[in-house]
Image (cartoon, rainbow, N blue to C red):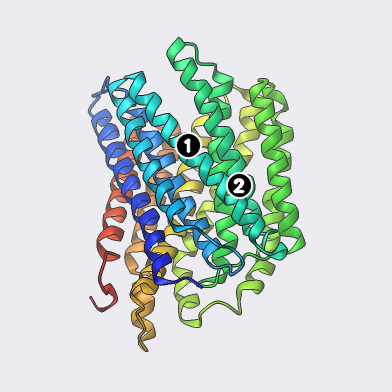
Amino acid sequence: MLTQKNAQLLLRYYRTSILYLLLTAIITAIIFGLRLFNIFTSVPITAATVHLGTLGALTLGLMGLYLRLFYSLESVTVNEWTVKTIHILMNIGIGLLTLGFILDTWPVMAVGFVGVAYATIWWVIQYFRWFFQADTQDRKGALLFGAFGALGLVVAILIGGYLFHGYLSENTVQSMRLTHIHAGFVGWASMGLLGIGVALRGGSSPVTKSVPALHGSAWLWSVGIVVLLSLLVTWQLSALMIAGAVVLLGFFGYGYSMPKVGALGSNGSEQTTSKGSKRLLPFIIIGFIALFLAILLGFDIAVNYPSGRAGSHRILGVGGWLLLTFLMALLSEIPRTILVLHDITTSDSDKITQFLYPNTFKVSWIFITLALAVMLGSFFSSATVLFGGTFILGLVVAGLSIYILVKYRSGAPIQS
């Protein structure tokens, strides 16, 4: 059961994640807004922005979401000091790493990287300690996806250190760069979000149990990722289709298992919120369509590299799948955590539903989807259309982030 004290710690992770998402979105909007007018900045801010989004928003957000799962298990004991310290170290490391990228100063960047690496590896160690404290039946679903994702995070961090060495020697190998990216996005972020998707099927009582098809899907995904990273490191691009085929099987297995997973969580779901939660379904629907298309485009890239549709693959994978699914997870959890924090109860079910799933979420989804459609259409028109779509996407995500931070602030906002 989630206590008020635990809810406070969760909100530290959630709100920090949204703040980083806000910064990422604002900088993205500025960069592509300038490009609309053919103004290309020489400041090395792109790498800083990417790491604000991946480490600040995505990683801290996923850490909080999985922390929520461990809080729901009576068999797991989470040390408050450890959770707070990891959060502080991550923020210091991200801040220094970002500053190092912007100033193009390697000592600052190095200290920031050490801070991030120490915090993430510490969190992974803690994750597996909590994982093995959990009952056996709770380790085969959401937490298993998170465990595989945590291993992907370690790989991404270790390769990040290798790339930093390449940065100093001005000899960055493309194969290692792509391995780093896919370890982070596919190994860590995608596996992590797949696990959170399972957990959210239970509403306020997260699903941690599993069914055979889901358990098998987790292993298929992990095998596919291992093969993918191995082939990228050795630069065997034509053989990437093998990894894609395994991941695609995992994708179908995951989809097949979800109705049965939903049955596991039906008893724990609140009737009031289950109806309102349908307002977030468009996020996950578009997200999984984007994931499916991104996997298919991976085959095209493997066959036709470097002339494959890498641009569309990135937009669908990062913008469609990761962004929309991540937003769905946070939009589901932040309001619910606020209710726990302030122990708010009311008999007005419509009022609770509107608080948990305001119409702003739906409007934001519409504009985000339109912006992504414009970005995809740019490959059939011009770079200006791509810049415009990305500019709109940045503005919409920034606006949604501000809305979340303001609406779900301290106090009893359900009365407002």
- On screen, residue 263 above or below 403: below
Residue positioned 44% across, 30% down in the render: 114
| Above/below status of 333 relative to 152 | below
C-alpha gap between disc 2 and disc 1? 34 Å
Nearest the viewer among 147 and 283 is 147
Q: Which residue is mark 2?
A: 292
- Residue at image coords 64%, 23%: 233
Q: Amino acid at mark 2?
A: Phe
Residue 336 badge: none
**Residue 380, how many percent across, how many down?**
45, 33
Task: Give the vertical position of 397 relative to 96 (above or below).
Answer: below
Task: Determine which quarter of the picture holds residue 25.
Answer: top left
Under tag 1, what secondary structure?
helix
* Residue depicted at 51% across the width and 73% down the height: 1
Task: Name the residue that disc number 1 marks.
Answer: 118
Position in image of residue 180 (x %, y %) = 54, 29
Dot 2 and dot 1 residues touching (CB under 8 Å): no
Check disc 1: other Cα within 10 Å, few if <14, some if 14-19, many if 20+.
some
Total label count? Answer: 2
